[in-house]
Image (tube, rainbow, N blue to C red):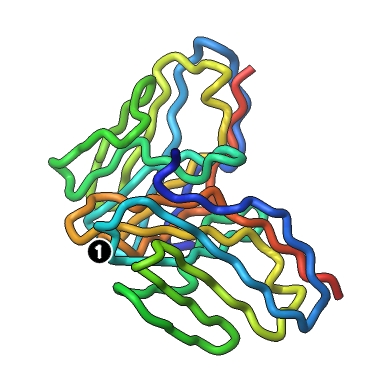
Amino acid sequence: QKEVEQDPGPLSVPEGAIVSLNCTYSNSAFQYFMWYRQYSRKGPELLMYTYSSGNKEDGRFTAQVDKSSKYISLFIRDSQPSDSATYLCAMSGTNDYKLSFGAGTTVTVRA
Amino acid sequence: DADVTQTPRNRITKTGKRIMLECSQTKGHDRMYWYRQDPGLGLRLIYYSFDVKDINKGEISDGYSVSRQAQAKFSLSLESAIPNQTALYFCATSDTNEKLFFGSGTQLSVL
């Protein structure tokens, strides 16, 4: 079993829809949770960063962490074609030297 | 100019050849990483370095070696390339464990 599970999709939605992405994990020591966005033939870039449980909002993006269920989510409101990308979840523990990544979910927002 | 620069962007090589992928950064970060990305497997850590004199193996270091020539330069070598090393390779830097800054990647094909 992978340490971080993420449905690879692909996910296709119409412009303006809400995009819902999620990851589950097995390591209860994870404290830092991130979402990276990766455009085609580009490197991933950090989109959202959350420490421990709770919600974080940044414009159209909301990240949620439920440590009791070992489940994290990313919501994109009013999705735009420019949101078409692969979204990777990532997480780490307090003293980890590396991030554990999900496989990534490919999202296409249709105009 | 990009903060993290990888060269080459694309490389095709033959089985058994030695090749080097190069990475340079202008972010002033001490920590540098090499990842490979394969479809369905996400990002996996090959090697990482927390300063010029510190080199550490990641989860998939077999068949690879690295050199940290300076704070800003970190190169990855494949001593004798094999077809299953065909992948997208990323260099990354950070000043924390969590927030990585990636280059644009090198697409490597081993025939």
> Which residue occupies the extreme top position in the image?
B16
Position in image of residue A7 (x %, y %): 61, 53
* Residue A45 vertical placement versus B70 (above, below): below
The kind of residue on which mark 1 rests is Thr
Query: Is B71 positioned to the left or the right of A81 in the image?
Result: left
Query: Is B85 positioned to the left or the right of A10 in the image?
Result: left
Position in image of residue A40 (x %, y %): 67, 55
Q: Residue at x 63, y 71 (%)?
A: A20
Quarter holding the C terminus of chain B is top right
Query: Is A54 positioned to the left or the right of A6 in the image?
Result: left
* Residue A79 vertical placement versus A11 (above, below): below
Kindly identify which chain the residue marked by label 1 belongs to: B
Q: Residue at x 71, y 66 (%)?
A: A84
Depth order, front residue of B40/B51: B40
* Quadrant housing residue B100: bottom left
Depth order, front residue of B12/B41: B41
Position in image of residue B34 (x %, y %): 38, 42
Query: Mark 1: which secondary structure?
Result: loop
Q: Number of marks in the image?
A: 1
Dot 1 alpha-carbon crowd within 10 angstroms: few under 14, some 14 to 19, many 20 or more? few
Q: Residue at x 62, y 56 (%)?
A: A105
Q: Residue at x 30, y 57 (%)?
A: A92
Report the residue marked by disc 1: B96
